[in-house]
Image: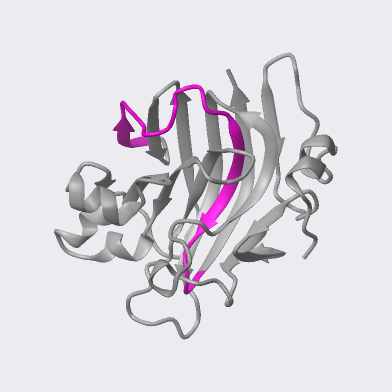
Amino acid sequence: MKKLSLATVLSSALIGFTAFSNADNMQTLPLDSIDNTEAVNVLAEVVNYQGRDAIKVAVDPDHKSIEEGGCDNCTYLLVDNAPFSNGVIEIDLAGKPADGAPAWARGFVGVVFRVNEDKSNYEGFYLRPMNALEAEPRRNFTSQYFSIPDYPWHVLREKFPNKYEKYADIKPGEWFTLKVEVDGAAAKFSINDEEIMTVNEMFQDADLAGGIGLFTEPETDAYFSNLRITHN
């Protein structure tokens, strides 16, 4: 995999991506190349999944969990570092447990955004598709908002039970569309045009700007295609 520094990515043209349109502030990234991306504790490759070109992302086997002295919610492929602050992110996703994964694997797949230059601060939202097949209360943990560094998923679940996790009607391994609408401190998250969660006060500064990343967790095959960004 080709790895580039953040400075290089910021200054480079997007190879394999369509041109940026100043007229309507729209940017379309088909995700058919891993050029001008940066892997953060993951491995990535271009594949054909269910008839479409996509980027497959999986956690690097050398990555250490927080219990092992590493980090949590810190595994993603940074694909676009034209600073995103406010606007709309839309992306097609699919996630399923990897072959031979243990029973706890949930098929984690999602996005991080407003990733700052040293990757110490960012917001995120991901799905656990396997949970959508479960009975209550576990099915209510299908989707997850989180904020790094101080509010990974387990902190939010402990301090704010049921507030930042909701049910979403998705299936493991099947494509769905995630829409993230960001305005200052607020964000609305929708799946296939159905609103799942609104966070009125995210935990990072409202004016934070930064990159967008394709997020996954261990024991998962995560697929990403057709990223669309509207900058406000």
Residue 58 within the magenta-colored segment of the rendering: no
| Residue 150 placement (x, y as % from top left) | 37, 46
Q: Is residue 93 above or below residue 199?
A: below
| Residue 89 placement (x, y as % from top left) | 54, 34
Horizontally, is 124 left or right of 203 in the view?
A: right
| Residue 125 placement (x, y as % from top left) | 42, 45
x 50%, y 41%: residue: 121
Q: Is residue 115 above or below residue 185?
A: below
Horizontally, is 54 left or right of 89 in the view?
A: right
Can residue 78 be seen? yes
Residue 114 appears in which quarter of the rendering? top right
Of all residues, the one furthest to the left in this rendering is: 136
Residue 199 within the magenta-colored segment of the rendering: yes
**Which residues lie in the magenta part?**
194-220
Camera-side residue of 45 and 118? 118
x 55%, y 47%: residue: 92
x 67%, y 25%: residue: 26
Horizontally, is 146 left or right of 71 in the view?
A: left
Q: Is residue 133 above or below residue 85?
A: below
